[in-house]
C-alpha cells in the first residue's frame, strides 16, 4: 500500500505534542510505503514493533511491521518535527474510562466525530491538563482535528513540567519560556540531547504548540571512514 502525503503532514508548522499528528496501520510481517518529499531523520520509540527505512532515491519511507503492538515515531525535516503512531496489527485504542475522566475534568470538552475539528476543549486547570494528556495518548483524535484553548495557569504548569524534564535530560542546557502560546527553547545541545528534548516536549505537552526553536545543535563528531552508515538507536523511557 502506498500513500501520498503532503509536506505539511510530515513537518507541521507546530511542535509535536499529544496527540500524534498522524496514525498509520501495517500488519505484522507486512510493509507499507509512505511517500514524502523530504526526511532528514527519524527515531522509533520501540523498534521491536516496527522498523523504518528512508528510501531517498524514491522519496519513500518504508514501514515494516515486526510484531503486534504500537509505537511512536518522531520525524524531522527542514528543522521541523512531527510525531506519528504506527499500529502493527492493532485496533484503534479507544479508552472510554479516559474519555469520561477528561469530560468530568474539562466540562466543555466536545467530541464530534463527523466534523473536521473532532475535539474542542479548554484546558483550564491542572486536573484537566492531566486528564487530557492521558486521553490524547489514545487514538481518540489526531492533532490536526483538535482545538485546545489554554488558560494561563495551565501554560505555567506545563512550562514548569517541561523545564524540569529538560533539566534532567539535557543537564540544564535548555531554557524554556512561553511567549503567548508559543514555546521558546534556547541553549546549546548535542544531537542526542536535542532528540531527548523533543521526546519530552511530546510526552508533556497538549496540542501542537507554536515552537520557536532557538536551540543550537552541535554537529556530531565525524565518523571514521570505515564505520559504516549511522544507526538509529531505540528510545529508552
Image (cartoon, rainbow, N blue to C red):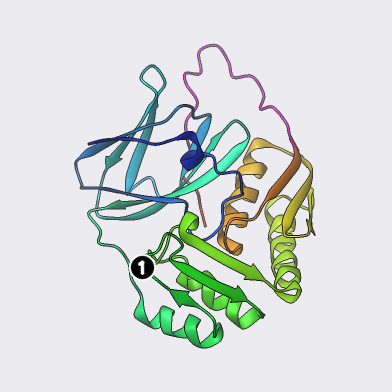
Q: Residue at x 73, y 54 (%)?
A: 183
Q: Residue furthest bottom?
A: 104
Q: Is 76 drawn above or below residue 84 in the view shown?
A: above
Q: Is 195 drawn above or below residue 200 in the view shown?
A: above
Direction from residue 13 to residue 69 in the image, left or right: left
Callout 1 crowding tier (Cα within 10 Å): few <14, some 14–19, many ≥20: few
| Residue 223: in magenta span | yes
| Residue 91: in magenta span | no
Placement of the N terminus among the 4 image quadrants: top left
**Where in the figure is residue 140, as x and y percent of width and height?**
39, 67
Q: Which residue is mark 1?
A: 113
**In the picture, residue 217 is in which quadrant?**
top right
Q: Residue at x 22, y 54 (%)?
A: 89
Q: Residue furthest top?
A: 225
Q: Residue at x 52, y 61 (%)?
A: 18
Mark 1 residue element: loop
**Where in the figure is residue 16, as x and y percent of width and height?**
57, 51
Direction from residue 207 to residue 182 in the image, left or right: right
**Where in the figure is residue 91, as x and y percent of width and height?**
25, 62
Image: magenta residue range:
216-233
Front in this rendered view, residue 205 or 173: 205
Question: Of helix, strand and loop, which mostly describes the magenta segment?
Answer: loop
Q: Residue at x 38, y 16 (%)?
A: 57
Amino acid at each position: 500500500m502506498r500513500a501520498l502525503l503532503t509536506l505539511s503532514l510530515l513537518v507541521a508548522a507546530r511542535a509535536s505534542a499529544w496527540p500524534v499528528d498522524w496514525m498509520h496501520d501495517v500488519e505484522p510481517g507486512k510493509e507499507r510505503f509512505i511517500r514524502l518529499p523530504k526526511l532528514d531523520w527519524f527515531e522509533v520509540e520501540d523498534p521491536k514493533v516496527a522498523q523504518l527505512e528512508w528510501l531517498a532515491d524514491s522519496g519513500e519511507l518504508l514501514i515494516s511491521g515486526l510484531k503486534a503492538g504500537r509505537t511512536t515515531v518522531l520525524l524531522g525535516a527542514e528543522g521541523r518535527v512531527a510525531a506519528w503512531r504506527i499500529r502493527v496489527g492493532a485496533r484503534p485504542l479507544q479508552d472510554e474510562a479516559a474519555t469520561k475522566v477528561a469530560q468530568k475534568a474539562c466540562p466543555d470538552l466536545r467530541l464530534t466525530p463527523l466534523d473536521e475539528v473532532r475535539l474542542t476543549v479548554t484546558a483550564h486547570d491542572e486536573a484537566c491538563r492531566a486528564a487530557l494528556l492521558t486521553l490524547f495518548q489514545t487514538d481518540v483524535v489526531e492533532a490536526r482535528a483538535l482545538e485546545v484553548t489554554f488558560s494561563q495557569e495551565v501554560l505555567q504548569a506545563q512550562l514548569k513540567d517541561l523545564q524540569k524534564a529538560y533539566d534532567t535530560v539535557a543537564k540544564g542546557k535548555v531554557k524554556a519560556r512561553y511567549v503567548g502560546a508559543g514555546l521558546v527553547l534556547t541553549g546549546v545541545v548535542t544531537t542526542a540531547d536535542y532528540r531527548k528534548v523533543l521526546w519530552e516536549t511530546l510526552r508533556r505537552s497538549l496540542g501542537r504548540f507554536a515552537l520557536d526553536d532557538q536551540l543550537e545543535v552541535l554537529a556530531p563528531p565525524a565518523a571514521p571512514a570505515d564505520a559504516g552508515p549511522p544507526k538509529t538507536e531505540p528510545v529508552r523511557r
